[in-house]
Amino acid sequence: MLFGLALAAIALRAGFRMRRLRTRGAKPEPGLLAAHLRVARPAVPLLLVGFLGGPLSALFLRDWTPFGSFHAWLGLAVATFLGTAGWLGLRMQRGRLRRDRGAGLHGLLGTLGMLFGALAAAAGMVLLP
């Protein structure tokens, strides 16, 4: 999970840089979008698989109630925000959503996903053996 969050943080940094250039009316940096995609594309599936592993681990390995912790609910928010941001990004990349219409929501969801991801990581520390 931490590796997926680290990749997502790198993607977020590149996304912020693209947004900053776009809002200033500057030319896009060559390779910046490719760098964003290179780390974001594996980050989202890694985080979603990790999210699915949480309730399964709680149920089958720890004999806990799935979604019986604050960490689990934060994880659901992270999966929702980053999964939706990834879906919007894929639609923009494939030309099914105009960048001027989707980039703002995509960025907002990615940012919220990372904020909630940091909270989920902190909340998960108390669950460690």
Image: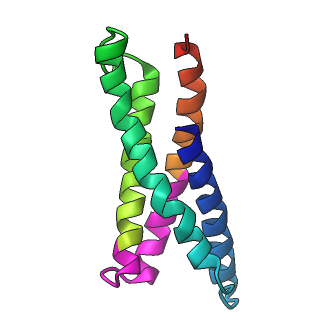
Give percent across and percent down for residue 114. 56, 47
| Coloring basis for residues | rainbow
Q: Nearer the viewer, residue 15 or 48?
A: 48
Residue 92: give x, y in percent of width and height: 39, 77
Q: Quadrant of residue 48?
A: top left
The question of residue 95 being in magenta is answered with yes
Q: How many marks do you count on the picture?
A: 0
Which range is magenta? 91-111
Residue at the front extreme, as displayed: 61
Q: Is residue 73 visible?
A: yes
**Is 8 situated above or below 14?**
above
Q: Residue at x 39, y 29 (%)?
A: 73
Where 10 falls versus 57 (above or below)? below
Q: Is residue 77 left or right of residue 96?
A: right
> Residue 68 lies in what quarter of the image?
top left
Residue at point 41%, 18% (across, down) = 69
Image quadrant where one finds the C terminus: top right
Dividing the picture into quadrants, the one containing residue 22 is bottom right
Q: Residue at x 34, y 80 (%)?
A: 97
- The answer to whether residue 100 is above or below residue 5 is below
Left or right: residue 107 versus residue 26 is left
Residue appearing at x 51%, y 61% in the figure: 40
Task: Provide residue 104's location: percent of width, then percent of height.
Answer: 49, 69
Q: Is residue 109 visible?
A: no
User: Does the magenta stretch mainly form a helix, a strand or a loop?
Assistant: helix
Q: Nearer the viewer, residue 115 or 36?
A: 36
**Percent x, y for residue 100?**
45, 82
Question: Is residue 103 inside the magenta stretch?
Answer: yes
> Above or below — where is 16 with respect to 2?
below
